[in-house]
Image (tube, rainbow, N blue to C red):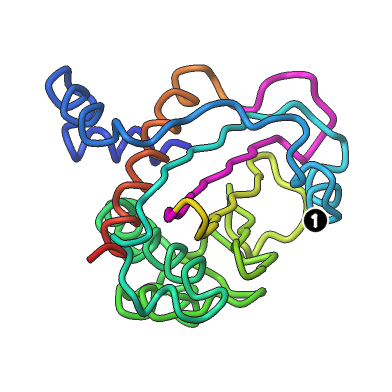
Amino acid sequence: MGILKQVFALTGWGTLAGAGSLAFYTRKSKIMALPTSDYLYNTTFYSRLNPHLNPTMNDICIRKVPMSSIKDEYLKDEGKLAEKFCAGIWSTWGFAVQRRYLERKYRDQTPEQLWDVKDLAENKYEVGTYITDHFEVINKTPESVVVRCGDSPRVQQPRASDGVFEMVAIPDKANGEVEFQLKSIFFNAETQSQNKPVPFHIEVAHRWYTKLWMESAIRSLTK
């Protein structure tokens, strides 16, 4: 989570003026705690990654967009929209600062992973894909892509910084709109603990960062 401090410092969003512009820019995205009834908590991969069922930092960011605003080619084939939404998270400017930071530190050690913007924009994000040495695709359906996050995918055992992040795109033809969701669940999986995985100020920064990712990705999908 230390990367969040660098992102906000480099972009100026940590200033009062920057925070105001960020709030305006992301005003259409709504973020709240992830309901305890969400299916992610009942998946085999969540049980495997958080074996102690330690406390989590969790949220869901929701943004609805008129279907008429989405590029036609992303609505033709089942699963294409979720795939391109995922690609939009990693290949657009919302992730650019973090991508460059990770690239400087880890690309030489992991050249086979996804690093270049072109590759991030065009990949299909099948299970097993490694993204910038920080994310691993662990589940994919026609409506969502789930990645493990928090540390390098080269570290497969339970980690002190661990989590799952889901990107969801649900077309609603009856109402003529698409509901986009970003779900986050972070936890310390290394040892049994009753403590929250991150301090409150990092949780707040994460929520702003998630809303920024949402807006950045959606702009890559619209006409």
The stretch of residues the image draws in magenta is 176-197
Residue 188 rendering spot, x and y as whole percentages: 71, 35
Q: In this view, does 182 lie to the left or right of 147?
A: left
Which part of the image, by quadrant, shows the C terminus? bottom left
Query: What's the residue at 85%, 47% (across, down)?
Result: 47
Mark 1 residue type:
Phe
Query: What's the residue at 43%, 53% (across, down)?
Result: 177
Above or below — where is 108 with respect to 196?
below
Above or below — where is 200 with respect to 111?
above
Q: In this view, does 114 lie to the left or right of 215?
A: right
Query: What's the residue at 79%, 49% (across, down)?
Result: 46
Q: Which of 178 and 59 is in front in this view?
A: 178
Question: In the orientation shown, which residue stands out farthest toward the front?
Answer: 174
Q: Is residue 6 left or right of residue 175?
A: left
Q: Is residue 76 magenta?
A: no
Residue 141 rendering spot, x and y as whole percentages: 66, 68
Query: What's the residue at 47%, 69% (across, down)?
Result: 81
Q: Nearer the viewer, residue 21 or 221?
A: 221
Question: Label 1 belongs to which residue?
Answer: 45
